[in-house]
Amino acid sequence: MANVDVLDWDKKKVGSVDLNPEVFEQPVKKAVLHAVVKWQLASRRRGTHKAKNKSEVSGGGKKPFKQKGTGSARQGSSRSPLMAGGGVVFPPTPRDYQYTMPKKQKQVGLKSALSYLFGAGKLIVVDAMKSEAGKTKALSKSLQTLGAKKAVLIDGTEDSTFKRAARNLPLHRYYGVEGLNVYDLLKYDMAIISKNSLEGINARCGVGVEVAPKAKKAVKAAPAKKAAKKRVEA
């Protein structure tokens, strides 16, 4: 179990904490990271793309020119895909790009991303994430002190004042534990987590969570066999 320093926003040590090796010291599975990022990007697509085919474009009921004698290829409609202003042969249509991913695979992805950042020395644990005035300038200076040019900030519970201070920082993202995701961890390539978020991060990764045993289905008793009929002596 790794023991790391807990820092304040002036980069001074104020304590230490143990990180769960089941979350922060796991093998980095690149295939799982790729699958989770692909799933996240697909889920955020709106899928509202639309173009019209020949039957949906208005007009085109009249033959544009006579069949013979023009020297041009024959046309029956001015809305043909071969003509300007016509329809599209195989147009994009609205669709839903979302698909489901197994919960355990998502948990493995989070473990891999956190383990990668911890192994690369890009994971910082701070004592708390609080902002008295909610000023972006003060938070930006504190982040520069920590050496975090861009990072994901993870807190146990989202603080409205701290969120106001962080929302104008283009290279930083602030979330509660529920917002922790693989895409942002890899994109910003650094994570600053608060001490009180560790328990929630472990729970998001499926570690330390007791799973209730499944209730056994009641088995119906087999019907009693009918008593064999007594043989009647002839």
Image: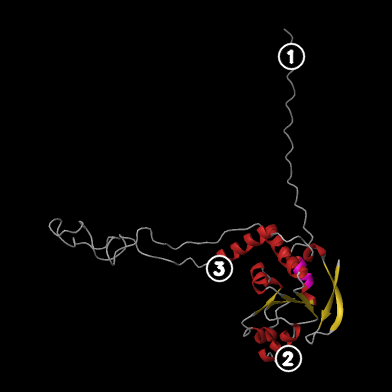
Question: Which residue is label 2 attached to?
Answer: 132
Q: Quadrant of residue 65?
A: bottom left
- The magenta-colored residue range is 198-202
Q: Calculate the distance from the C-alpha at mark 3 to the C-alpha at mark 2.
A: 34 Å
- Coloration mode: secondary structure
Q: Calculate the distance from the C-alpha at mark 3 to the C-alpha at mark 1.
A: 76 Å
Question: Which residue is label 1 attached to?
Answer: 231
Judge from the rendering whether residue 149 lies leftward or rightward of residue 82; answer left or right: right
> Under tag 1, what secondary structure?
loop
Q: Nearer the viewer, residue 149 or 60?
A: 149
Q: Earlier in the sequence, mark 3 or mark 2?
A: 3
Judge from the rendering whether residue 88 lies leftward or rightward of residue 205; answer left or right: left
Return the x and y of residue 215 as percentages of the image width and height.
75, 51
Question: Which residue is label 3 attached to?
Answer: 44
> Under tag 2, what secondary structure?
loop
Q: Amino acid at mark 3?
A: Arg
> Under tag 3, what secondary structure?
loop
